[in-house]
Amino acid sequence: MDPVCKRIRKHILHVSRVSGHGHIPTCFSVVEMIHAVYRHMRHDPKNPTWDGRDLFVLSKGHAALAYYCVLAEAGYFKPEDVETFGHYGTRFGCHADRFKVPGAELSTGSLGHGICVAVGMALAQKIRKTDRKVYTLIGDGESNEGTVWESLMVAAHQQLGNLTVIFDHNRSQQRSLPIQNPVAKFGAFGCHVIEADGHSLPELGTALRADSGGKVKMIVANAVKGCGCKTLVDNVFEWHRKSPDEGQFKLLLGELDAETV
Amino acid sequence: MRKQFKVTVSDLAARDDRVVVILGDISHFLFRDFQEKFPDRFYNMGICENTIISVSAGLSACGLHPFAHTINPFITERSLEQIKLDFGYNRFGGNIVSTGASFDYAWDGATHHCYTDLAILRLIPGMEVMQPGTPKELDTLMRSQYSNGKPSYFRMSDNPHGLDLPVEFGRGVIVQDKKAYLTVVTAGPILANVHEACKDLPVNILYFATIKPMDHELIARFGSTEFLVVQDAFGLQEAVAEVPGLRITCHGLPDEFCVWYGTVHDIRKRIGLDAAGIREAVRKRLAVVG
């Protein structure tokens, strides 16, 4: 595991421990994806509203804690600022508020919205003839929402080659409505599809740099919910929205250090 | 009114390169010259109203002034969460322009009726809600509000009321002031029937093309009178009632789907919103309040 991504996971565990909030397994699924985007795209933590920045939208808004910890790692704010996560009056709600979180482009939470707004942002860059890029992260559960597919049809039809969608393929919807054969599905919708290991920064980096030939780029990032801790992976439903007590916190930290998954 | 929308937005687009039109696969024939003139700022996005709203919010996020336009129930009731979150909660400005008010598409049945749009959209914080009654009113309101950084809803109708009134955003109009004990309040195209019903009756008539923000000052000026709200869509009565202490009754819509087809005039007659039905309701109220 990349040492920075391990540090981000420890930060997630710590914040969840002290705040009593957090979707830890889904956060652990996307750490490398968000971190890879922020390593790749143009942005300036010291000037979050810089006109020339690329845009990232966290469409699967419930991974906000992972997003905050990546932003903290990137220098948007201090890691300890996030410890008030979910508390009354905090800047760091369990879903991000773009007016409170430096670097957040959109307030998200209800699934199937962020990707559609990201399509609009990408279309705006095309209209304004800029070279800014737009990135968004969607979940496989989120992809049960019809708007995900509506917006992909629009994006493909408008040939938004400046839009990259990362699909967190952690198979969380096996319990209800799985997205079968996502590579074929997204390809059929007109996307340039690249499959990658969702926990490999080199593979994600290669995918992010790849030329999509003017098409919408869809990175199907194969991932493991709870990646890093065997306890989380083996009990994803129990841990869906649960924060650890002191004993569990030590157990999870130990598993993370030992890289049990 | 749709033709006026095209004329107004074409003029705005010529003056302001941030104006972008998004259609939900209606009015595209009407907008063909707009498309020829501004090909980079015209998108017939297809029949996907939820996405049209969210994409418009994304355009707004990047400094553009979107006009999202399609049939009323689909762009408002169907897309309420997109309007609430992607425009409202995120505080992006933009313009949502519907066509097919209340029973304009009577012949299509209840799937195409829309009379909750004003009521639900006025509940979204920061939202501006307008129901112009004529093409001229649409033009005035659209020009004054389209780029003010707020989400603005324009409810168009195919049945304008035909009166020439000095409408401006956020202000009501006194159509008739007879220093009467009863004040009839109405909004949008149904004013035609209200005016015909009441012009020779001892009642005041107030008219509103802006539902939110409501002109509290004008309402309060008549606060000592009884109010009768005559509406063909929900929302006006609640907006009037924002002023405390009023005595308000309402003549409006039945608690049933209006499934009789025909024209808007057939439906209005059936539910008592033609001139005769309104006159009867006003006279009944006059008999009670004196």
Image: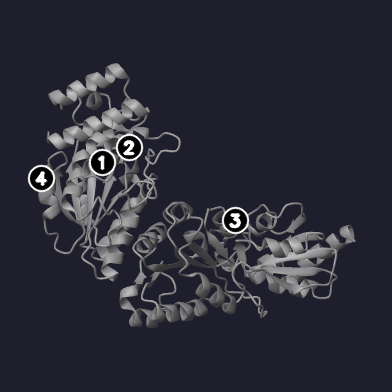
Where A93 falls versus B154 (above or below)?
above
User: Which tag is nearer the camera, tag 3 or tag 1?
Assistant: 1
How far, Cα to Cα, is label 2 from label 4?
Answer: 31 Å
Q: Quarter of the image holding residue B18?
A: bottom left
Give the mark nearest the N terminus, 1 or 2. Answer: 1
Asked if the residue under mark 2 is in contact with the one under mark 1, i.e. CB atoms within 8 Å, the reply is yes
The residue that label 3 is drawn on is B119
Q: Residues within 10 Å of mark 3 (few under 14, many from 20)?
A: some
Q: Secondary structure at mark 4?
A: helix
Q: Are marks 2 and 4 on the same chain?
A: yes
Judging from the image, mark 4 belongs to the subunit labelled: A
**Numbered circle sitting on residue A203:** 4
The residue that label 1 is drawn on is A72
Q: Secondary structure at mark 1?
A: helix
Asked if the residue under mark 1 is in contact with the one under mark 4, i.e. CB atoms within 8 Å, the reply is no
Judging from the image, mark 1 belongs to the subunit labelled: A
Q: Residue at image x 38%, y 44%?
A: A109
Q: Amino acid at mark 1?
A: Ala
Q: Are marks 2 and 3 on the same chain?
A: no
- Residue A205 on image: x %, y %: 12, 48
How far, Cα to Cα, is label 1 from label 2?
Answer: 9 Å
**Numbered circle sitting on residue B202:** none
Q: Amino acid at mark 4?
A: Glu
The residue that label 2 is drawn on is A81
Query: Which quarter of the figure is the C terminus of chain B placed in?
Result: bottom right
- Residue A6 on image: x %, y %: 17, 32
Q: Secondary structure at mark 2?
A: helix
* Viewer-nearest residue: B48 or B228: B228
